[in-house]
Amino acid sequence: MKVLVTGASGFIGSHACLELLNAGHEVVGFDNFSNSSPESIERVKTLSGKPMRLVKLDLRDPDGLDALIGEGFDAVMHFAGLKAVGESVEKPSLYHDNNVLGTHHLLAAMERTPCRKLVFSSSCTVYGAVEKNPVDERHPRSAVNPYGKTKLDVEDMCYELAAEDKRWKIALLRYFNPVGAHESGRIGEDPQGVPNNLMPYVMQTAVGRREFVNVWGGDYPTHDGTGVRDYIHVVDLALGHVAALDKLDSFKGAQAVNLGTGRGYSVLELIAAAAKAAGKSIPHKIMPRRPGDAPAVWADASLAKKKLGWTATRDLDQMCADAWRWQTGNPAGYGAADVRA
Ligand code: NAD
Ligand code: UD1
């Protein structure tokens, strides 16, 4: 298929482009480089040995979208978006404008062409305060911050569009906690500033950029008192997108599918696995709970297996080994090649 990938040079988008190329798809990507570098796609081209066009374009540029989408695509994979929860609390209108209005422009541009196939990056954040684990797709949805609200709004937009026009086939992929990097160590996560998420913080502590890991809460009702999450290897996640694309014809309108492993690990278990991968101990201190954090969240991943024929195969040790290879091989991320805006 000829696939347009938005947010192509970002963390998950770059891994998805690589797996799409490996699966034989033709890929055109675009990004505004607000949180990524075009260097990631240079490396994707080298890793795959295949050509790929990358265009600088903003989701909020309707004319630019029309020109690009008008070239004709079989499907769109939509990763572009802002994703920092704290920033979304400070700048809710920026998040609405970029993620919701941006997606509205994308869908409107698609409607001016015959293309009605979409794979969207949703998130387990749409489950709000999780009531019971494992979480399946029927769990009530709610937003606990403006970032989460943008995911709810885009999901709703997709449900409404597909109810109106039966040609739409939309996979709303709800990711759990994506971590790791490609096993080559050439592409990975390149967060700006001090990371909020656990894995990049742990990796930066292991290389000595941070003094110790703050373990947010040691008194949760979990087996060791620390928070439990469903960490998923980014390559498994990317392969889940390729599987969703292959199975889109079987979708009835817009449908949500969890992408997780179905298994939860605690903060201390992740730190221990990272220490094993790095071959050194990783200093950490138990601190008070982080406001808004759930004690435990993990996926019921059975629908993805049934509907997409996909399951995650990479375990926590591999997630940490690959994240470590990326971190040590690229201590400054994409570094000098980074021209992000
Ligand atoms: P990322 O920031 O690495 O990638 C997003 C990309 O979109 C970046 O390259 C950024 O420059 C681009 N972008 C942002 N706004 C744009 C715009 N207006 N026009 C064009 N490009 C734009 O983030 P990621 O981790 O790869 O996340 C990809 C998607 O998956 C996002 O929608 C995110 O909300 C979603 N998601 C991520 C996680 C996670 O933990 N990483 C979890 C659940 C869902
Ligand atoms: C966060 C976002 C969520 C997003 C997800 C994936 C919040 C409230 N939620 O989820 O919307 O979809 O990332 O990008 O930000 N932890 C520490 N020390 C740290 C960092 C984290 O102990 O320095 C703990 C947390 O308390 C949690 C676990 O590690 O138990 C994972 O945290 P994190 O990586 O931030 O992801 P989530 O909070 O699950």
Image: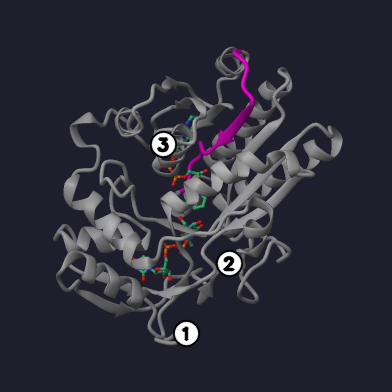
Q: Which residues are magenta?
A: 71-83
Label 1 crowd (10 A; few <14 / some 14-19 / many >=20) = some
> Badge 1 is on which residue?
222
Mark 2 vs 3: CB contact within 8 A: no
Judging by the rendered image, the residue that carries numbered circle 2 is 299
Q: Earlier in the sequence, mark 2 or mark 3?
A: 3
Q: Is mark 1 within 8 Å of ligand 2?
A: no
Amino acid type at mark 2: Ala
Is residue 22 something one can see in this rendering?
yes
Q: Magenta stretch: residue 81 in it?
A: yes
Relative horizontal placement of residue 334, taking residue 99 as reference (left or right)? left
According to the picture, the residue beneath numbered tag 3 turns out to be: 18
Pick whichever, 328 or 31, lies toward us: 328
Which quadrant of the picture is home to ligand 2? bottom left
| Residue 251 x/y as whole percent | 75, 44
Q: Relative to 181, is 299 on the left or the right?
A: right
